[in-house]
Image: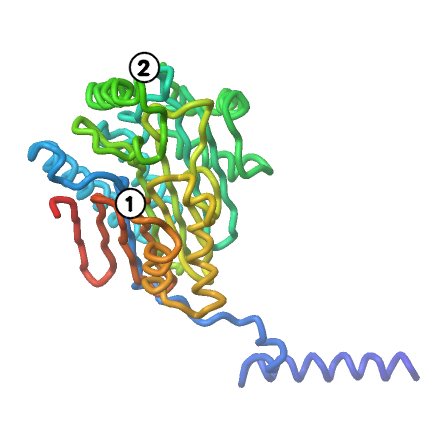
Amino acid sequence: MKSIQIVSCVVTMLFVLTSQYCFGGLPNDMNATTKDPVDDSKYAIVVHGGAGFAPDVYPPELNDQRFQAMEQALQIGVEILSNGGSSMEAVESVVVFLEDHPLFNAGKGAVFNQVGGHELDASIMDGQSLACGGIAGVTTIKNPIKLARLVMVETPHVLLVGNGAEAFADRTELERVANEWFDTERTREAWELLNKRQENKGNTREQSLHHLETGSYMGTVGCCALDRAGNLAAATSTGGMTNKKFGRVGDTPIIGAGTYANNRSCAISCTGFGEEFIRHVVAYDIAARMTYKSQSLKEATEEVLSKVLKSGDGGIIGVDREGNVVMEFNSGGMPRAAADSTGRFDVYWHK
């Protein structure tokens, strides 16, 4: 008798579920995890080429070249996003392009450290999963951002440094180069000039930030993007500070300081005097202000730049989950660019 009752109950339940499915969907409690449809028409991207000096410090032809490079970088990201590519693919591809361009302090064109070599840092973060990867102090990786992404996807770690990062790279197929490959005449002149100025003056923050007519001091490159699936990502890469000592590492490879992305709020990439961005955990602070204080991306960014950081410390780019972008700085200048699915395509450097 009990067996007949059990079979009867099962049949009844199957009938109810089948009826609901065919004529009205599943019961409410079984629809609890249903997601709203994604707006697959919206995307946005923002790029920076490093906070530092104003355009009038550089020759006009150099400014034109930098402007054109930013325009090309932005177009690379737009093509990926407009064709349905992921935000992770977009930010990595844009940063790779800028690492390969000799006018930016990342990859080719990275500044010289105190002993006349190059130590490069990079990080990348996926706002959907919070997966992230960073590398610091590498010397032979042609595109550090690629290694940072491999740290994210192929290891359980977040940050690899120096010889350990190089050893991990040995297990990959990433292109390697001699350290001298990163040299450029412009960055060598900047390094030599700074050495002359610091011979009897030490290496204070104020002296370090003094204008160098031949090259940038604080440059970094970065990109943030929102893709059509609604996912955010951020990536940042740098050669660090001219004449840096003792294996110094700045904010760029530090998740939460120089790079951060979270689909709940925004994606951020920072550039400038890295020690200040680390002390104030700037990238995460902006996301936290949005989450806990309900500030907009613009409000949070402007407040951090004006009330937390000092004048001249650097710049911040970001994009939120609605596709709003910021490109703010309190330094002399910052090459920057932004585009989105509305047709916006803006590049700023000559002013």
Tell me the mark number nearer the camera, choosing from 1 and 2.
Answer: 1
Number of residues whose C-alpha sits closer than 10 Å to that of mark 1, classed few (under 14), some (14–19) or many (20 or more): some
- Residue type at tag 1: Gly
Query: In the image shown, does 267 or 56 lie closer to the viewer?
Result: 56
In x, y percent, where is residue 132?
50, 43
- Kindly identify the residue that appears in the image at 39 percent across and 59 percent down: 229
Which sits in the foreground, 186 or 93? Answer: 186
Q: Nearer the viewer, residue 212 or 258?
A: 212
Q: Amino acid at mark 2?
A: Glu
The reply, left or right, for residue 295 in relation to residue 111 is right
Q: Quadrant of residue 204?
A: top left
| Mark 2 element type | helix
Residue 1 picture quarter = bottom right
Q: Which mark, by number, is residue 312?
A: 1
Q: Which residue is mark 2?
A: 180
Which residue is depicted at the point 47% across and 49% down?
281
Q: Could you tell whether 72 is left or right of 326 in the image?
A: left
Give percent across and percent down for residue 40. Answer: 34, 63
Q: Residue at x 53, y 31 (%)?
A: 160
Mark sitting earlier along the chain (1/2): 2
